[in-house]
Amino acid sequence: MAPTNLQAKSKKLLIIEDDQALAGVLTRRLTRQGFECQQAHDATQGLLIARQFKPSHILLDMKLDQDNGLCLIEPLRKSLPDVTMVLLTGYASIATAVEAIRMGADNYLAKPVDTQTLLKALDTAPLETGVQQLDEGPLNPKRVEWEHIQQVLNANNGNVSATARQLGMHRRTLQRKLLKKPAFDHRT
């Protein structure tokens, strides 16, 4: 049997995730799959550990407490040009997926994610998982609204107040909409 990409490369994984419980679960799951794992719980720690640990793979949470994981993609890519980087998010949108890939992420996955999907994202060519799942068929109106909000939020560098002003809605209304899971139902 031919070795997979993961078997051919060193399997050192850096998990940059501010939810320490989730980081622990991911570490246990992926250690069982042969990864040597290290964790970082904020942007500064993530960059420091990446330079010291020199991982072959990175799982990067998009929302890191007060930081945006998208801001880490370029510095991580500069210091580790050959790393396989997968962005994880609880707030999946086509706008952020496109932005993440444009900035240098290899894949983009919505949480929660099962182990097999995660392994496939870490082991396959860019865009073979994740983003394609978001871009199939017409979107329902709630999903279209979610995409528009994500684009405006991205244009405002994650600033919720500026985004709410630009969208002409109250900040709390926007925050409630951001907390809801987007609709993936493709019926109109």
Image (cartoon, rainbow, N blue to C red):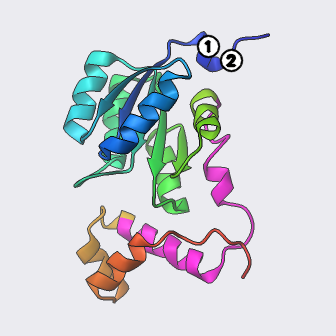
Where residue 7 sits in the image (x, y, percent)? Answer: 61, 13
> In percent of the image, x 67 and y 60: which residue is there?
135
Q: Which mark is residue 7?
A: 1
The percent coordinates of residue 114 (x first, y second) are 59, 43
Residue 78 at x, y percent in the picture: 35, 28
Magenta residues span 124-153
Q: Where residue 113 sits: x, y (%)?
A: 56, 47
- Residue 50 position (above or below residue 69): above
Q: In the picture, residue 127 is in which quadrant?
A: top right
Going by the image, does 188 lie left or right of 73? right
Report helix, strand or loop for mark 1. Answer: helix
Q: Is residue 179 magenta?
A: no
Q: Residue at x 67, y 52 (%)?
A: 132
Residue at position x 32%, y 40% from top? 72
Q: Are marks 2 and 1 in contact (CB under 8 Å)?
A: yes
Residue indicated by mark 2: 4
Q: Is residue 162 above or below residue 84?
A: below
Residues 167 and 62: in front is 62
